[in-house]
Amino acid sequence: MTDMLELSAVQARDAIAAGDLSPVEYSEAWAAAAAEDDLNAYLWRSGNGDAGAIAVAQPSIAPVAVKDIFCTEGVPTTAGSRILEGYRPPYTATAVQRLLEAGAPVLGKTNMDEFAMGSSNENSAYGPVLNPWDRGRVPGGSSGGSAAVVAGGLAPWAIGTDTGGSIRQPASLCGIVGFKPTYGAISRYGMIAFASSLDQCGPLTRDVSDAALMLAILQGQDHCDSTSVGLERAPQLPGRENLEGLRFAVPSELDRDTVEPGVREVFEATLARIEQLGGEISAAPLPHAEHGISAYYVIAPAEASSNLARYDGVRYGMRAQGGGDLIEMYEKTRAEGFGAEVKRRVMLGTYALSSGYYDAYYGQAQKVRTKIAADFGAAFADFDFVVTPTSPSVAFKLGEKTDDPLAMYLNDFFTVPMSLAGIPAISIPAGLAEPAGGGPQLPVGFQIAAPAFGEQKLLDAAYALEQAIAFDARPSGAPYVPSGSKKRSGSGGEGGG
């Protein structure tokens, strides 16, 4: 049999079911691969000996890496923050529990931007994750650890969270598939909250078929989460071979000068590929989408300031040492436990919600959000999908944007509008491009968005395009070749394949 680490999650499931693959040997092989982590991508691994509550008696599907924002019973859960150092939850998040019930043992907990606040994974209290394509560059964030372990051959698939692009953007920068489902498709119970009206769990995988399989496991209503509704039907494995009869909208308002030339070239080559497959490309207005970043960075910090008020050193997590009264203990604990980016967003959010400013900032941002959702609704009346680059750039160097928060925030320019509208979107690797300042060729993601609860149609279209591109997702030195890959696609022309 082919090296078991080369198998996709779908192939491994089928091989285990047929008796051609030992589930124990398969899981042990992945545990050995995870132990070789040199990307600072894992904060905890199952080989540490305390995995009782997140193990399965008989694995029947690929083991999964879990972003450290998901509570896991008896296992350290930090959300990338010192303020939760040593915290071991008494329960397991619904998303993780559903994977366990499906026969997927937890391989480890992955590093992340603190409380999911960031676009580079440099905000983790436990150090930055390195991009497996170039260890001097970021993997994207906040789910950078989950993206890096999949891209680097340290896990077959992973789950992350997406608030404003935190699954799709790292998937783009690491050359894998990242899927943000419709808001409410997957339970948020046990997922440590950042911005409750935006946060969503989703898969990071090698290919679209694996994303469909994981989404089928994760989705569903949960009585522990009143915002969860699930999908009308669990997604099936995609099999579409062309894009005939489908219309794709390119929003002219998102045509920014900040898009790197190489990224733009790959994007345009992918549009040409869509037309070759029978799809129709047209421009469509999304007049309010360009204000998405401004609205997001009012709404998300406002919700974060409320959600993070619970970290006070009283009930769980770290407590600052030293004298003083209760208020002083609160202040000292939060000052020592939170990182700079978390403090920045809590301050922004608290200000936006304060008396005299609520209507001017938070209220206005919610109106913009409504307008953006209406724009997408109007576009989907005439089109099946909206497409954009996933990120305006390829992976940037570590430290390159840490002193410029605005430049960092603009990495989410293309992903935030879909989050505000609550609609599903997927990023698939479309080719390679050089960074604007020169350097090695790096992955470029292509984003496809669909109407709410249009997951199956979106997966089918993404699969057809993925097969035509045939991107080789293996960074130099990674130990696997994704099955079905033909050759690595380039940065221009046909886009490879």
Image (cartoon, grey):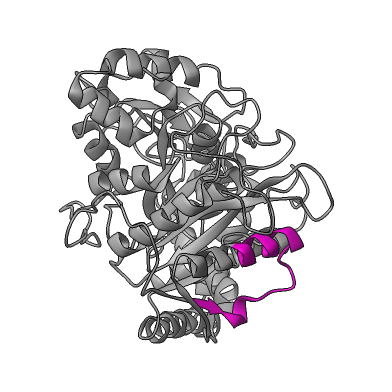
Q: Give above or below for 196 relative to 320.
A: below
Does the stretch in magenta take in 138?
no
Q: Position of residue 143 (x, y in %)?
A: 51, 45
Does the stretch in magenta take in 256?
yes
Residue 119 shows in the view: no
> What residue is drawn where x is 61% and y is 28%?
39
Q: Position of residue 34 (x, y in %)?
A: 48, 21
Residue 436 shows in the view: yes
Q: Give above or below for 440 relative to 198.
A: above
> What residue is drawn where x is 77% and y is 51%?
435
Side of 494 where 189 appears, left or right:
left
Side of 427 where 235 appears, left or right:
left
Q: Quadrant of residue 452?
A: bottom left
Q: Quadrant of residue 476?
A: top right
- In this picture, which residue range is highlighted in magenta? 249-269
In this view, the residue in front, 229 or 389, is 389
Q: Which quarter shows the N terminus?
A: top left
Q: Position of residue 416 (x, y in %)?
A: 52, 67
> What residue is drawn where x is 41% and y is 38%?
158
